[in-house]
Structures are given as structure tokens and as C-alpha cells.
Image: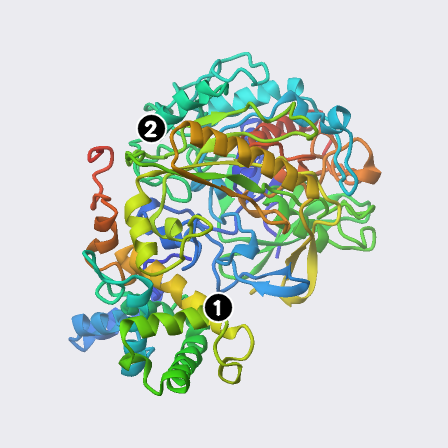
Amino acid sequence: MSLPHVNAVVIGAGAAGGIVAKELATAGMSVVLLERGQWQSFDDHDHDELISQRVTVLGNAFGPDNLRYRRVVRINDQWQQVLPSEGGYNNNAACVGGGTFSYGAMAWRFMEKDFKMRSTYGCPDGSSLDDWPVSYAELEPFYEEAEWEIGVSGDGSSNPFASPRRRQYPMPPFPYNHEAQILELAGRRVGFHPFPIPMLRNSVAWGGRSGCIRCRYCVGFACEVNAKCGSHNTVIPKALATGNCKLRTECVAKEILTDDRGRARGVTYFDAQRRLQVQTADLVVVSGSATESARLLLLSKSKLFPAGLGNRHDWVGRNLQGHAYTGAWGLFENQTYDDVGAGATIAICDFNHGNPGLRGGGMLANEFIRLPYLFSLNRSPDSPTWGKVHKDFQRRYFKQSIIIMGPVQEMPVFESRVELDPNVSDDWGIPVARISGHRHPHDAEIARFLASKAELWLKEAGAVQTWLRLPGTGVSGGQHQAGTCRMGNDPKTSVVNRFCQVHDVDNLFVVDGSVHVNNGGFNPVLTIMAIAYWASEYITKQWKGTQFK
Amino acid sequence: MKRKSSLSRRKFLQVSTAAAVSGNLLLSCARNRQPESMLTAHEKELVEAISDQIIPPDQDAGGKEAGVVNFIEIQLAGPYKRFQNDYRGGLARLEATAKALRQKSFLDLSFDQQTELLVILEGNQAPADIWGSGEAGKFFRMVRDHCMQGYYGSPRHGGNRNYVSWKMLNLDYPQVCGRNLT
């Protein structure tokens, strides 16, 4: 059975897929947007820590579920099947809006040097570090578009290390919470340059939605007043309002179809009733995030593409990266916590670049607001993990602690990868993704360096005890997953070109974090959004010249 | 997956229609909300005792009073189904360990003796003929984590009775967003 032919099918209604669907539909193309998850609402989940994206022990509030999904992960030299609610799964949400429905919503632009890592620093042994085929200057207008269409609160002139911008943010920055006020003074005393974190969250009523009420939650939760800005409450409704875009939820993509000339023809998927459907289209856009986009390309094998689409040179699924998180904890004699969400309000970019002997670095920020169970898992190295002393610690320090953390700019590793598992299938009989690899040793060097700066900051702020929180060496992925369909000019060492177009299939695009050559020392979502606008402009221009017919 | 209920909407309609016909609607719904009893009375007492070790009672409620065992039972019938056998086997081994080392049930040990025994489990120092290698520590960490979840997580899952842990942390509840700032 075949559904009416459309101009474009977009797979995945997350940060990038929502933008592409809206841009294409606005340009007059007929679009089908497929999403394996559902529409979600705050009322379904409340502020429930144990199913939030921060904890997930009782399941993922925003999908995927434990009943139908599996992955296989290499842990301690063994392949292990893991559930979506377990950490090794490296989950990103599965719902309309994707990760943007429940994210922390930090709105970072990468810096100029993040796009030129190889030419700035050279490539370390054991890494596939490279320059992007697109520059910050080229992406700058598209960052601006993301900031103004999705909505960012911030102060565009407060970070002296930021790369140049033409236009301010649409909303004023969030004021500092109590711990950030403490950190601002201390930071300036030690010569840092702290500033308010730009956030994809309404600091004032904007875009027809209310301002943030600064509740105790935010990161990992749905917003109860719809003040968090994601694709689900901005671009996707706009796409649907054009009348040109159909969103189909609970649809699980199985394979991208190609014709005998090697062009993409459409996609097969299982609909909500588990019926296999065929959606043909003039062009196909894959926006499933780094793990699932790579998996779908690998699943799409044919005579012309025996190793999967875009995979002629074995680069699909390679260079999986995310962010090792590093930093420090500090305990204080006085209350530092004022119960004002989202907690994270202050950051520094003093150590993103120019660190002696290191390639890149990372930003540092105060942590999102504490959650009671999550806090119970964190103790100083000499402190017991249960019993009376543990309970006393919880009671005393829940409101007398500050945590500073930041993402390590990882060196990509070719061996860190997503493949298809030969044995395990999901509930639809589709082979699941399997994940293996490790972090580059350089990541640990950056982690130690940044953590020492975080500790210095806390000590200056008056911490009576501090300790470092350093990351492990296992493969990265998680909500910041990236890199598996690298963007590049050379088809032999990349999967897509600078416009996210698969090198040997000109009507197939991958638009999401998969194309990142490097994931920066920042939360990646605003860059994913900017790339989506950038690629969409190319697609719609090509479309008007009818390159895809 | 929606988490509102383990019943699908369609199933609920079927059940409630049938129940309405038999004039038994309320009873039927109430019964469906009860978890199956996952632990025996003795196993429940063991888990309660462990939960008071993990979060001992003092000026604030301990694990037992906070309903941690209730949380664990509900989860063992749902998301933690996969741990049912770990609980049954682990609790039996805990009892066997108490009898081997102290000639008593774990429940008859003093609070400090119970602590000592759990420290032995945590450090994988328990008799290998009872536990095998590494299993004691694994069991202990699983129960510890579940106790913490039951104590500090949302009361909607059956633990944290009367919001006891949130009160202990001086977190206002219910939170009137943006209004009960300190």
C-alpha cells in the first residue's frame, strides 16, 4: 500500500526535524513529518524525578519505552542488552519536540575556533579531529534565526569570549539566583568573566506563551507553563498551520527506499497500528539524532548500497561523541540555595580555547537545580553512601552546596561508533543499534583542567570542602550525541556535504547533530538548530530550481 | 508510553463497562490499582529493616515509616519486574548469611549488628558459598538505590509518605510556583 506522494518526508520531529519541516512547508513543499513518539504534556508526568530525563529509573517520561525498545552496548568488553531507562542506552527523548520538550535549554553558539579545530590545534593521535566545511561566519545568520524564531533569553554583549553577533537576543537574560550571585563576585575576584547563560526559555512573555515562573525543576521535565521553547511549541505548530505539513506520530521508520538510479524514493515505516506503510517523496530528510539517524542509513541496504546509504567508505555511525561532564562540588557553611529554578544561570567561557597544552576546552556553569534522589547519589569521596551520616549530609548540605560543571570538548574517535546489532531486534523486528568505543585520552586532560578551575571558583566563593567530579573513559552519546554522519568536503572521509546532503544520494539529507564534525565545548542544540536552518535554505533553493524532480 | 495507568484506555473502557454492567464499578477500579503482593510478609519485614538501615529514623522518619517497602512492592509489579528474582534470592541469602554468621534471623539482630552485616555485603565479604563472587555487593547496591528512590522520589510511586523527605530538606510542598521562594 502506498500513501499519496509528497515533496519531502522528514524523519524525526526533534530540534532539527521540526525546523526543516517548517521551512520546507513554508516554501510551499508538501511535507510529511514522521515521529516515533507522541505529543506529550506536563499533566502526564508532573514533576516526577524518577521518570524525568535526569533520572529515568522508572522509565522515560518522554520515551522511548522499555517494552518495545532495546539497544546493545559494549560494556566491560562484553555486548550487553540495555533498556531505554538504563544509562548505557544513551537515550534522547522520543516525542514531538524530541529533546527540546524537556531539555535544560542552554542556547550556546559554538565559537569560531570550534569550526576550525584541526587547523587551530592539529589532530592528536587516535583522533579524527577535523575542521568543519562551514564557518562560524556562514552560520551566524542561521544562529540568529534560531534565536529569534525558537526564542532565546540572554545578554549578547556580556560574554567577552563570544564570537561576533549582529543582533541581540529577543528576550532579556534571566537574573542570577542566589548561588550565581555568590559565584559572580567570586568569579570576578579570580579574574574570570561570568555572565548570564543564554536560554531557550522565555524570561518574559514571548511568542504567545508565558514567561518562566522559575519553578524548582526545568531540566529533564516538561514545562508546566509552556515557557520552555522547543520545536513542539514553535516551528512544528507553524509547519502544521501552513496546511502543507502532515505530522504522523507513533510512526517508526524502517528503511529509506532507493530506486535503480540510486536516488532516494521514500521511506517505509510502521504506523501506530503497526501496519507497514510506504511514503514516497521527492526527497528524504533524516533527523533522528546521532544514534537513530546512523541506524536508519545502515538499515537501508540495497544492491547499489550494500553497506547502507552514505556508507560507501564506512563512515556512517563513526565518530560518535557527546560530552564528558566535568567539574567540582563545594560545601558551604551558609545557605546557597534559594529554590529558584532552573538553577543554572551563570557561566564562564574563559576556558573554551587558549588553554596551555590543550586543544579546545569547555564552558563552565553552575548546575541545574538539585533533585532529592539525584543528590543522594552524590557525596564527597570520603562520605558514606547510606546510613545516618548519609542522611545527615542530605539534610545539612542540600541547600548548602554549589556544583559547577561543564561539557568537555571531545576529540572525535573513529572507533567510537553506532552499528546494527546482528542478533537483537526491536518490537517491530528491526535490528537495534549497538554502541561501542571510548573517549580520547585528551578528554581526560581537559576534564582535569576544567575541574580544577571549577574548584578554584568554589573555593574563592567560600566553600569549606570541595572535590572534583571527573568523567569516565567510556563512549559518549546521551542527549548531546553527535558526529555519526560527519559533514565534509571529501566523500571519502565524511557522509554528507556542507549542506547536509548525502554525498552520493543527492535527494537524501541528514540534518541533526549527526553531521557535527566536533561537538564544541557547549550544549549542542542551538548549533543543531542553526544547521537545520542552513540546510533548509539550501534545500528550498534547490527545490525552486526543481533539482529534486 | 503514557504512565497514567498500566491499563490502556481501551482496556479501561472495556473493564469499566463490564464492571458498570455488574454494578461493581468502584470495587473493580480499586482492585485494579492494588499491586500484586510481590513479597511475602517475612520478605517485607526484611526490606523494611534494610530501609531503616539505609535511611535510619531520627528526628525525621526512616525508610520504614516513609513507606519504602510499599514503593518497592509497587515497582516490582511494574517497571522493576526484572528485579523480582534478585529480591527473592537476595533476601533469602541475606537470611542465610545472618544465620551463618550470627545464628539468628536478620530481623532478630540488633540495629548495629544489622549494620555490620550490610557492611559485609556491601564490601563483598559475605560467605562465597552463599553469594558467589560479587553478588552480595550488587544486591546491596540495588536495594540501597531503590530505598533512596522510595524515600526521596515523588509520593505518587508509593514511598515518601506525607512528603517526609521533602519536608526534611525544607522543600515546600506543594510548591506554589514562583511564590514560595525563601
Instruction: Indicate the position of residue A115 as horizontal and vertical percent values.
Output: 68, 26
Query: A332 or B168: which is nearer to us?
Result: A332
Visual colour scheme: rainbow
Q: Which mark is residue A177?
A: 2
Q: Is residue A120 visible?
A: yes
Closer mark to the observer between disc 2 and disc 1: 1
Instruction: Indicate the position of residue A262 as horizontal and vertical percent values.
Output: 80, 45
- Write down the residue under mark 1: B123
Secondary structure under tag 1 reads loop
Q: Residues within 10 Å of mark 2 (few under 14, many from 20)?
A: many
| For residue A473, side relative to residue B121 (left or right) | right
Question: Which residue occupies 53% across, 53% down?
Answer: A251
Disc 2/disc 1 C-alpha distance (Å): 41 Å
Picture quarter containing residue B134?
A: bottom right
Secondary structure under tag 2 reads loop
Q: Is residue A428 visible?
A: no
Hey, what amino acid is under mark 2? Asn
Hey, what amino acid is under mark 1? Gly
